[in-house]
Every structure is written in structure tokens, then in C-alpha cells.
Image (cartoon, helix red, strand yellow):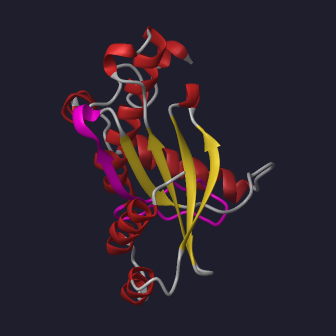
Amino acid sequence: MFPKDRAIELTRQCLEKMDRSDCSSILEDVEAKRQRVKIQQLCRLWAGMGSIYKFSVGETLEFVVKHVTPPPPGKQSFGDRRKSKSYQVEANYYKHVAPELLSPPPTSPPNCLVMPTPYVVEYGPNDDEITICMSYLQGSWIQTGSREDVQGTLRWLAHFHAAYWGLGTIDELVERVGLQEIGSYWHLDTR
């Protein structure tokens, strides 16, 4: 499970990044132990390389923590190295790309695609341990969207792709922030 001191520290860091008027009072309550940080493990990651947790403080504050702990580099199989690289790419995406795509947010109708807001992305020594804290997205999957939902989704995807389209921009971004060379976020040869 997650150490309590680490949970409080991550909560503090996330609260500093959130756009909420009550962040300072929530932080004071957490640090004074008037409110506790409730941690629920949502799932384990590939090959036991960590877990995804939901952190809750009170009734209104929730965020997700993805904590990646791959085997030490000298003890990783070929598959472990690929999975570890995939988690590094994901962390790089949330640290460097997602904030740009979320500001300013594209206009879209309700029930359209949304992306979690990254609050904290940390790398351990040697980039082996990774912690990603992001907004908790609630809701249900769109099963059959209306024409407006489909159009909103297509606008969101167009915005997503247009952000780095053309003139070698994506190649420069891949190199600069450490994304997958084929597919940018996902390694397409394995899809």
C-alpha cells in the first residue's frame, strides 16, 4: 500500500496545481490530520509493475495516482524493458504534451472525449520509478453518441492531431520529450 507521508505529499503537490478555490483549506485540514487521504487501489499494472490508486479527500476531492515500479534495469526481461519504456513514454506525454493540449481546452459538447489533467509527474532515480497524478474522470462510456457527440469527438481528435501536425513538428517533439518514434504515444508495431 501507499505510505501515508507520501500520500499527503502527493496530495499537497496536486492541490497546488488544481484550479479550486478551496485547495488551501483542504491542504490545511490534511496536514493537521483533520481530514485523511483515503487511498483505494483501482488495479495493478502490467506484469505487477505497480498500481493505479484513487485518492479521495473528503467528499469532493478525488484524483488518480499511477505508481510504476518496474524491476531493476539489470533484472528486466525484454518484455519488462518494453513495458518500462512504455510507462516512461506515458509519463513524458503527461508531463510535456498533455498540458499544451489542455490549454486552452477545445470547445466540445458534453459527453465528448476528455483527457485527464496531469497534476504531478515524477521520475525516480534512473527514471525507473514513475508517479503520475492526474484528475479522476468520472462517467460512463459513450455507447451510441448523437450526431453532436460524434462531431464533438471528431473536433477533439482534430485538435489533438493538429497541435503538432506538419513541418517536422511531431518529429522534433518526439525527440525532445521522449515519445515513441512510431506512433508518438503508442508503439504502433505492437498494436
Task: Give the side of residue 102 with respect to residue 174, left or right.
Answer: right
Using the image, determine if residue 134 lies above or below residue 190. Answer: below
**Farthest-out residue, right:** 144
Residue 114: x %, y % from top left: 55, 56
**Residue 126 among magenta residues:** yes
Using the image, determine if residue 175 lies above or below residue 159. Answer: above
Task: Give the side of residue 63 with respect to residue 98, left or right.
Answer: right
**Residue 88 among magenta residues:** no
* Magenta: main secondary structure: loop
Residue at 53% in and 15% down: 190
Residues 96 and 144: in front is 96
Residue 121: x %, y % from top left: 33, 51
> In which quadrant of the rendered image does the C terminus lie?
top right
Residue at 35% in and 66% down: 9
Residue 186: x %, y % from top left: 46, 27
Residues 44 and 31: in front is 31
Residue at 37% in and 47% down: 94
Query: Can you tell which quarter of the image residue 139 is in?
Result: bottom right
Q: How many marks?
A: 0
Which residues make up the magenta segment?
103-127
Task: Give the side of residue 83 with respect to residue 152, left or right.
Answer: left
